[in-house]
Image (cartoon, rainbow, N blue to C red):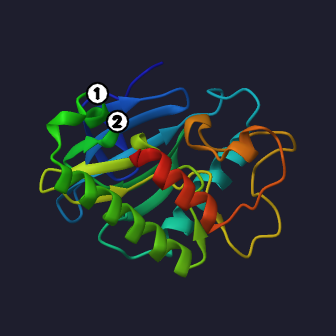
Amino acid sequence: MSFLTPGSRLGRFEISTVLGQGAMGVVYLANDPQIGRPVAIKTVRPGMDRDETAIEIEERLRKEARLAGRLQHPNIVTIYDVGRDGDDYFIAMEYVEGKSLTRYLVAPDDLPLSAKIAIVRQTAEALAHAHERGVLHRDIKPGNILIARDGRVKVTDFGIGRFTNATTSDLTRTGQMIGSPPTCRRSRCAGRSWTDGPTSSRWASCSTSS
């Protein structure tokens, strides 16, 4: 996998460094020179998933931006922009200086009980706001819960989310599983019928915090 070098540009954004990478792309720390603020840039390049076309990638990212763009909550990462630069499709979002909940699960004793309760409460408040605005996350897991240095929770990655009034599971192929197995409801993982709604997000939130 190739990386953008520090100082290079993606759209109007100036790349600073790599924050992380996954099977589908790379996340960078970048600078928005127009207003002088740091941003996180999630990139996806066609070919990373041989079953997904460039058109599907672009629509998936735009859908993620539309979902998160409907939300305005202190515990949800803010989306700033979505676009394309050459072969790279990207989303620019709020940069959270901190760690994902996954890091804390390696050494759970590092978090006092009061902090654990605060994480569950803030995550639940973020999901409640999303549900009130008609948005389902559908992939709540430790890696998608960021803990800022001041202890604030930031829920991120609405990539497989959907609107509650959607008639189909957007961009999910027939027979394709969505979400992460460790936080799926048992009935869902077993292939039985289930309701894709707020109850599923609450289940995932409880599974994540257990």
In this view of the protein, can residue 96 be seen by the observer?
Answer: no
Which residue of the protein is positioned furthest toward the left in this rendering? 150
Residue 186, x across and y down, in percent:
69, 43
Q: Which mark is residue 160?
A: none
Residue positioned 15% across, 47% down in the render: 112
Circle 2 residue: 102
Q: Position of residue 117 (x, y in %)?
A: 27, 58
Q: Quadrant of residue 24?
A: top right
Looking at the image, can residue 163 be seen? yes
Asked if residue 167 lies left or right of residue 28, the reply is right
Q: Nearer the viewer, residue 124 or 158?
A: 124
Of residues 170 and 119, the one drawn nearer to the viewer in this rendering: 119
Which SS class for mark 2? helix
User: Residue 135: which quarter of the image?
Assistant: bottom right
What's the amino acid at mark 2? Thr
Residue at (62% x, 35% y) in the render: 181
Q: Secondary structure at mark 1?
A: helix
Relative depth, front residue between 200 and 160: 200
Q: Residue furthest top?
A: 1
Q: What's the amino acid at mark 1?
A: Val
Seen in the picture, residue 132 relative to 59 is either above or below; the reply is below
Q: Is residue 99 left or right of residue 88?
A: left
Front residue of 179 and 200: 200
User: Which one is in front in this view, the residue at disc 1 or the one at disc 2?
Assistant: 1
Q: Which x, y percent locates residue 165?
A: 73, 76
Checking the image for residue 106, the label placed there is 1
The quarter of the picture where residue 142 lies is top left
Residue at 37% over, 49% down: 145
Q: Residue at x 65, y 47 (%)?
A: 185
Q: Specify the quadrant that holds the C terminus.
A: top left
Pointers 1 and 2 in contact (C-beta within 8 Å): yes
